[in-house]
Amino acid sequence: MDEVAVFVAVALARAVEAKDGATADHTLRVADLAVRLAQAMGMDQAGLLRVRVGALLHDVGKLAVPDRILLKPGPLTAREWAVMARHPAAGARLLRGIQSLATVRPTILHHHERWDGAGYPHGLVGDAIPVEARIVAVADAFVAMTEDRPYRPALSLTEAMRQIRRGGGAQFDPALVCVTVRIFEEAI
Ligand SMILES: [Fe+2]
């Protein structure tokens, strides 16, 4: 994987944002934070590139979700939710056969797993979840909380960090939550 992969991943991230109406550059912010977390964990250069590209592509499977579900303003029905929940596997499938992106497919497939095993698609628990996917999960949640949404204003950084902390050991890798808190405290 090389820098070309990053350019392709940025283009695909923008395609996803254009389709799902997410805040502009949401995915780029997720990728930047994910790389900072990975750096703080001591990851090597190859790992950092894997995290960046995986973060940029984590929701690429949303391209395969029908607009009537992806853009539905109200709550999803159980059947619609089931379709939505296929986006990690759909994303991994989209990249099937692209050898240079093979190492980021686990990040895409597992970015909605939870540390306690209550996530999807495979219900992986703890360290069984690839570390890149654990990093993207924390970064995506934190960035999303700090952005305005149609149904709520952005949370303050302090409140978002409080919620990330609360998710340690349940939704998120507790060690990673500690790293996130440290980065946050250094930044303020
Ligand atoms: Fe996702």
Image (tube, rainbow, N blue to C red):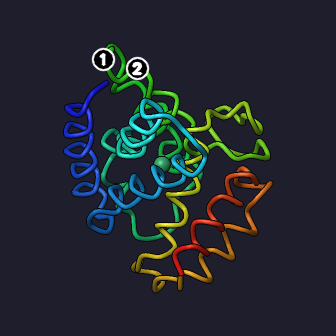
Q: Which residue is mark 1?
A: 98
Q: Is residue 124 above or below residue 95?
A: below
Nearest the camera: 48 or 186? 186
Q: Is residue 43 above or below residue 21?
A: above
Q: Amino acid at mark 1?
A: Ile
Q: Residues within 10 Å of mark 1 (few under 14, many from 20)?
A: few
Q: Amino acid at mark 2?
A: Ala
Local SS, label 1? loop
- Residue 2, picture quadrant: top left
Q: Is residue 185 above or below residue 29?
A: below
Residue 188 rendering spot, x and y as whole percentages: 54, 82
Is 156 on the left-hand or right-hand side of 93? right
Is 124 on the left-hand or right-hand side of 13? right
Residue 180 rendering spot, x and y as whole percentages: 62, 62
At horizontal 35% and vertical 62% (from top left) the residue drawn is: 26
Q: Is residue 23 above or below residue 77?
A: below
Residue 137 rendering spot, x and y as whole percentages: 57, 51
Residue 102 is labelled as 2
At horizontal 35% and vertical 24% (from top left) the residue drawn is: 101
Local SS, label 2? helix
Q: Residues within 10 Å of mark 2 (few under 14, many from 20)?
A: some
